Image (spheres, helix red, strand yellow):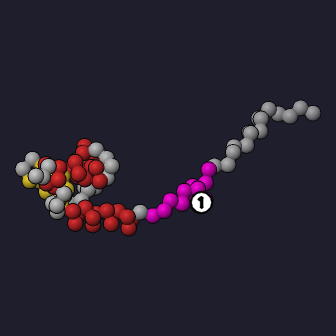
């Protein structure tokens, strides 16, 4: 006899909880990402939101393709500022 959790293992869709576990985040974050358009295409089936697995895989591949390595600290724009020099006093010099 199958358990309720294993009923979805052969499904070509992920629900919000499964996608959240896959991405190691919360279901709330998935709903927010979906609302902002930063999640794979999904559809509602009753009260559940389902994401086709092929859409999830395509979305993840696109995210990976657009991710570039960080070069922070290696370019002039990202180097830390040099230490500030002490200002010269504006007092007139006495001789």
Residue 4 horizontal side relative to residue 30, left or right: left
Residue 7 in view in this figure: yes
Q: Secondary structure at mark 1?
A: loop
Residue 18 horizontal side relative to residue 7, left or right: right
Disc 1: which residue:
74
* Labels in figure, total: 1
Q: Residue at x 77, y 35 (%)?
A: 89
Which residue lies most toward the front here?
A: 1
Q: Say whether residue 72 is magenta.
A: yes
**Foreground pick, 45 / 77:** 45
For residue 68, which quarter of the picture? bottom left
Residue 69, given in percent of the width and then of the height, sits at: 48, 62
Residue 36 in view in this figure: no
For residue 71, which quarter of the picture? bottom right
Residue 52 horizontal side relative to residue 46, left or right: right
**Foreground pick, 6 / 66:** 6
**Foreground pick, 60 / 10:** 10
Prevailing secondary structure class for the magenta stretch in the rendered image: loop
Which segment is the magenta one? 68-80
Q: Residue at x 22, y 66 (%)?
A: 54
Which class describes the residues within 10 Å of circle 1: few (<14), some (14-19), or many (20+)? few
Quadrant assignment for the C terminus: top right
Residue 40 horizontal side relative to residue 61, left or right: left
Q: Say whether residue 78 is magenta.
A: yes
């Amino acid at each position: 006899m199958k358990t309720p959790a294993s009923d979805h293992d052969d499904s070509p869709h992920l629900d919000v909880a499964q996608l959240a576990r896959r991405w190691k985040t919360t279901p709330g974050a998935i709903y927010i990402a979906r609302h902002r358009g930063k999640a794979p295409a999904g559809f509602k089936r009753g009260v559940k939101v389902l994401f086709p697995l092929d859409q999830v895989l395509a979305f993840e591949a696109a995210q990976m393709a657009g991710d570039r390595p960080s070069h922070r600290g290696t370019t002039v724009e990202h180097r830390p500022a040099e230490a500030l020099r002490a200002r010269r006093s504006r007092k007139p010099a006495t001789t």
